[in-house]
Image (cartoon, rainbow, N blue to C red):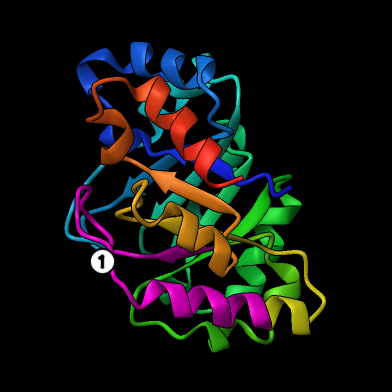
C-alpha cells in the first residue's frame, strides 16, 4: 500500500489566523508543511520571508518543506537551515550551478529538492537525479495560488518516474499546483509521492476532513 504524503501549502492559509491554521495541519493527517518563499523577481509575487517562517517553525510539529521561488537561492541556504527547514527546494531555472547548490543544501543538514516550471523538461535532471531527494513538478505557473491544473503534468510525472527508476535513484516526486480530489488519484497512479494542496484544503468548509479525504483516495 502506497503512503502518499499530503503537504498543505501554507500560502493558502489565512495569515491573520496563521497559528490556528498551523495547529490545524498539526492535528490533521497531513504529513508536511509546504512553505513557498517568493521574492517578486523570480516569480511575479512576494510571499512570506524569514520572520514568518521562524514563527511557523515554532508551532509546526511536522516536516517543513520549503520551496524557494527566488533568484540566487545559494545566498540563503544556511539561513533556511537555521530556521528549521527539513527540505529545501530550489528552482532548476534559478540555479547556475545546480549540483553545487544541491551539495550545499545537504551540507547544511537538509534534504535537497529541485522544482521544475511547467515548460522545463525532466530530462534536464538526468545527470543530477541521484543527488536529488525530491523533485517538485509545478503543475501551474509559479507565483500565485488558486490556478488551474496543467493537464500535461501526468505524462511529465511518468517520464520523471521512468528516469528515477532507470538511474536507480530514490527521489520523491512532488506535485505543486491545482491539486484537488479530481486529479489526486491519477497523479499518484502516474508516480507522484507527495501532493501539495493549497486552496483546495484551506478554502474547504472542513479542512481536516478534506485532508483526510485526499489521504484516503491516494492510498
Q: How many marks?
A: 1
Find residue 107 and report its horizontal and vertical position in percent: 75, 53
Name the residue: 76% across, 85% down: 166
Residue 3, x across and y down, in percent: 68, 44
Given residues 117 and 3, the one toward you in this image is 3
Q: Position of residue 41 (x, y in %)?
A: 23, 62
Q: Is residue 142 above or below residue 10?
A: below
Front-lying residue, 47 or 149: 149
Q: Which residue is mark 1?
A: 141
Furthest residue to the right? 168
Residue at left 66%, top 82%? 162
Q: Nearer the viewer, residue 185 or 200?
A: 185
Task: Find the magenta span and give its range.
Answer: 136-162
Task: Give neighbour class at mark 1: few <14, some 14-19, many 20+ (Cα, 10 Å).
Answer: some
Residue at 22% across, 30% down: 203
Task: Examine the rendering and report whether any part of residue 183 can be seen.
Answer: yes
| Residue 15 included in the magenta stretch of the image | no
Tell me the residue at 34%/75% (across/down): 118
Residue 48 in view: no
- Residue 7 vs residue 187, the one in the foreground: 187
Quadrant of residue 134 within the rendered picture: bottom right
* SS label for mark 1: loop
- The relative height of residue 51 versus residue 186 in the rendered view (above or below) is above
Quadrant of the rendering where the C terminus is positioned? top right
Q: Give the side of residue 22 with respect to residue 218, left or right.
A: left
Q: Quadrant of residue 213?
A: top left
Q: Which x, y percent locates residue 109? A: 74, 45
Amino acid at each position: 500500500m502506497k503512503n502518499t504524503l499530503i503537504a498543505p501549502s501554507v500560502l493558502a492559509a489565512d495569515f491573520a489566523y496563521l497559528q490556528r491554521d498551523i495547529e490545524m495541519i498539526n492535528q490533521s493527517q497531513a504529513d508536511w508543511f509546504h512553505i513557498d518563499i517568493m521574492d517578486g523577481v523570480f516569480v511575479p509575487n512576494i510571499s512570506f520571508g524569514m520572520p514568518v517562517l521562524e514563527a511557523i517553525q515554532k508551532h509546526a510539529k511536522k516536516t517543513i518543506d520549503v520551496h524557494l521561488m527566488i533568484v540566487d537561492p545559494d545566498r540563503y541556504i544556511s539561513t533556511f537551515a537555521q530556521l528549521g527547514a527539513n527540505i529545501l527546494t530550489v528552482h532548476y531555472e534559478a540555479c547556475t550551478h545546480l549540483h553545487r547548490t544541491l551539495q550545499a543544501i545537504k551540507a547544511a543538514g537538509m534534504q535537497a529538492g529541485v522544482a521544475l516550471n511547467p515548460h522545463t523538461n525532466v530530462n534536464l535532471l538526468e545527470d543530477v537525479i541521484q543527488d536529488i531527494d525530491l523533485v517538485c513538478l509545478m503543475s501551474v505557473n509559479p507565483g500565485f495560488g488558486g490556478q488551474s491544473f496543467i493537464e500535461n503534468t501526468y505524462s511529465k510525472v511518468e517520464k520523471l518516474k521512468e528516469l528515477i527508476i532507470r538511474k536507480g535513484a530514490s527521489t520523491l516526486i512532488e506535485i505543486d499546483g491545482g491539486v484537488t480530489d479530481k486529479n489526486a488519484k491519477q497523479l499518484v497512479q502516474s508516480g507522484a509521492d507527495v501532493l501539495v494542496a493549497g486552496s483546495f484544503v484551506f478554502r474547504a468548509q472542513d479542512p481536516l476532513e478534506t485532508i483526510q479525504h485526499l489521504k484516503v483516495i491516494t492510498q
